[in-house]
Amino acid sequence: MVTAKRRRARKAPPARPTPRKPRIGLALGAGAARGWAHIGVVEALTAAGVAPDVVTGCSIGAFVGAALVTGHIGDLGPWARQLDWREILSHLDLRFAGGGLIEGDRLMRFMSERQDDMEIQDLPIAFGAIATDLATGREVWLREGSLFRAVRASVALPGLVSPAASDDRWLVDGALVNPVPVSLCRALGADQVIAVNLNSDLVGKRAARRRGRSGDRARREVDSSGSNFLARLTKDIPSGIRGGAERFFVQLLDGERERPSYFDVVADSISIMQDQITRSRMAGDPPEVLLQPRLGHIRLMDFNRAEDAIAEGRDCVERILPQLEESLQLSG
């Protein structure tokens, strides 16, 4: 007699978990006026279908990053493109005390006129800014609290913008410790980081650019202006020395053929420092994608050259688009 064999009921294989989409981080580096290139980078990334889940910024990178996470990046580009020296200087509040030539209050008023301040933890996109504790030299991650205050601290360029007070501390520009904040991107949950280094094209190229300085353009703007807008910057200075202070401000930008100006020295020193720190930090924590716009022709205070910087930011992304797609699997 043939007995039927009982077939064992096969268990259904466990369902495979749906792969989680990698969280993309965007680390926007320091670089003063060269930071307008971040606008072009964001434009090109958006066109390529890249929407960051995490945004971190240092100095000008924090300023542009704040516009991105609050949905105002589309307004920032047109405004930056129309800047001339008269408007640039109108946003500066020149001082000869307080730890910097520029107080920074007008910059904050400018931000508040265009968008509402928000708590960082309430933003629709994870955001963080980098600053430096002036007393201890430690890196400070600004991940909660007022967005405006975080940006104000991160842009406090030593020697130019006065330090920002925060919880019994004085904070200055984060570029002193972490010019391209890849590490903060990862701490906020980014799996893949796109980093933008604005300073890779600078060191060793200063002498060729010494002529055609920012100060020359500033002087032309001052001379051609119908109203003495420098007087607004120096209104708190006693009238007896106000004229000299106005000339002094322009001369800060305008060096001589034989020797660099004040801003030349500050800009060159900061560029060297940022380049060396960035190289060291990148060696220990490299991003998945590194964007390095060619910005050696744009100086520290050339905020009136936004069109050039934005165009190079876009071009930088387009040059490495195949690598970007492969690294982030955009075409898959």
Image: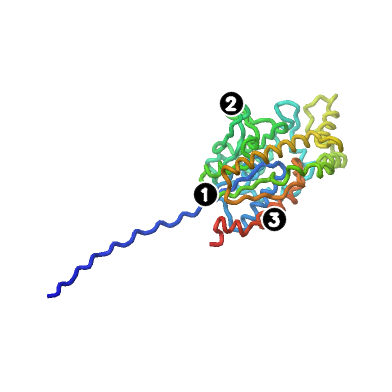
Residue 89 visible (yes or no): yes
The percent position of residue 154, horizontal first and vertical second, equals: 64, 37
| Label 1 – label 3 distance at C-alpha | 25 Å
Provide the secondary structure element on which disc 2 rests: loop
Three-letter code for the amino acid on which mark 3 is drawn: Asp
- Residue, far left: 1
Which mark is first along the chain, 1 or 2? 2
The percent position of residue 77, horizontal first and vertical second, equals: 69, 50
| Colour mapping used in the image | rainbow
Q: Residue at x 60, y 51 (%)?
A: 289
Provide the secondary structure element on which disc 1 rests: loop
Residue beneath disc 1: 191
- The vertical placement of 283 against 322, above or below, is above
| Label 2 – label 3 distance at C-alpha | 43 Å
| Label 2 – label 1 distance at C-alpha | 34 Å
Q: Residue at x 79, y 30 (%)?
A: 234
The percent position of residue 54, horizontal first and vertical second, equals: 55, 47
- The vertical placement of 244 against 24, above or below, is above
Residue beneath disc 3: 315
Provide the secondary structure element on which disc 3 rests: helix
Residue beneath disc 2: 168
Of the 4 image quadrants, the one containing the N terminus is bottom left
Residue 75 visible (yes or no): no
Is disc 3 surrounded by few (<14), some (14 to 19) or many (20+) residues within 10 Å?
Answer: some
User: Could you say which disc has been placed on residue 236 in the image?
Assistant: none
Give the quadrant of residue 249.
top right
Q: Residue at x 84, y 25 (%)?
A: 241
Three-letter code for the amino acid on which mark 2 is drawn: Asp
